[in-house]
Amino acid sequence: MRLAIHKEEGSFSDHWVDYCENKHISYKIVNCYDSDIISQLNDCEGLLWHWNHNDYRAALCARQLTLSLEKSGVKVFPDVNTAWHFDDKVGQKYLLEAVNAPLVKSHVFYTKLDALKWLNQVTFPKVFKLRGGAGAVNVSLVKNKAKGRQLINKAFGKGFSHINRLNRLKDRVWELKRDKDFAAFKKVLTGLARIFIPTEVERYSHNEKGYIYFQDFIPDNDSDIRLVVVGERCFGMRRYCRDGDFKASGSGLKSFDPSIIGTECVKIAFEVAQKLNLQSVAFDFIKNGNNYQIIEISYCFVSTQFPGFWDKTYKWHSVVVSPQFSMVEDFMENLKIKQ
Ligand SMILES: Nc1ncnc2c1ncn2[C@@H]1O[C@H](COP(=O)(O)OP(=O)(O)O)[C@@H](O)[C@H]1O
Ligand SMILES: [Mg+2]
């Protein structure tokens, strides 16, 4: 059996390569951006590729390559089911609604008229989001109708840059206040420069326009719950909001204490992951009254180590695990079964 890994420093591939080395699993390193990648994978049964939204090239080809490889019988991580909706909150809205998953009430419009009609009937605040982005940089509160109208005009006018540069800079200033170190200071400086000099992903991406996406605002959450399901394991943490803000993602303030995460939430995570046949999924949950609701999902995430996990009977196991190892473990198991 031959395994291929797309290697990129700082990505999940670091862990996958470590895993294969430790277990003496043979693999070859490939570059999924090579034009002849399909023929390079002719002698492989499986491909592991951690692609993400920071690389404009992945947005251009990762979904297409994955589907094509699956047609040729090559197994891929992440597979089509797991990744087609990655960095696409609008896609996730349809998918989660289709399986009756408890998604925060979400609204999408494709004409200015429809969006304005809706705006005239709703209460505030609402949450505005671009379909892509992470770390809360493309998420903001719409406090009133005037702000909503302004966003709608922009969505059906010149559109939004792929990344909200001002939010990114504000976030970095906040990080500097939090960490008070040189690394954070440097990030503020690059954030400042990035107001004027776009990143590669911004330069090669089209503006976001022709649609607008809102969610109902769920009040009284000082944190969100991040649960990651990989196969039979669920990993979790609570992430706290920035001071005076409703956004937790990207704050870096977190607790891994399992006792502050409700079993009900773990149950929903396992159920939805199974229903959608996902190899790996990170959920963001918040609490609406007594119910946990999903904000968004994503096949990949930042954390590489958790102090334990829940199994499918919701039993907690205190053992330091890396979900990235579980990914490759499950993947290899699956390849063996399919042989
Ligand atoms: N509908 C909502 N109601 C209340 N808080 C929300 C809502 N949506 C998002 N948030 C908060 O904002 C943060 C970022 O939102 P999210 O959709 O997860 O964007 P990102 O992809 O940038 O992480 C979440 O971690 C959560 O704390
Ligand atoms: Mg999030």
Image (cartoon, helix red, strand yellow):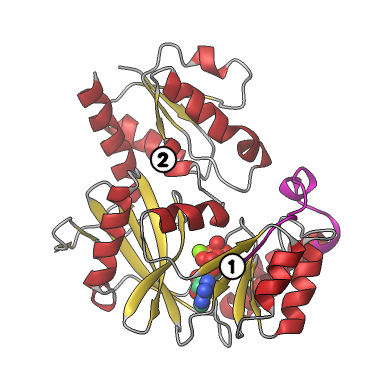
Q: Residues within 10 Å of mark 1 (few under 14, many from 20)?
A: some
Q: Is residue 310 visible?
A: yes
Residue 81, labelled with which disc?
2
Q: Which residues are magenta?
A: 195-214
Query: Can you tell which mark lies on residue 136?
Result: 1
Residue 64 at x, y = what percent? 56, 30
Mark 2 surroundings: few (<14), some (14-19) or many (≥20) residues within 10 A: some
Dot 2 amino acid type: Asn
The residue at label 1 has a CB less than 8 Å from ligand 1: yes
- What label sits on residue 272 in the rendered view? none
Q: Is residue 91 left or right of residue 116?
A: left
Q: Marks 2/1: CA distance? A: 24 Å
Which residue lies at the image location 61% right of the left edge and 37% below the top edge?
58
Q: Secondary structure under badge 2?
A: helix
Residue at image location 39% in from the left, 41% down from the top: 15
Question: Tag 1: residue type?
Answer: Ala
Q: Is residue 77 left or right of residue 171?
A: left
Q: Does 2 sit left or right of 31 as displayed?
A: left
* Res 189 visible: no
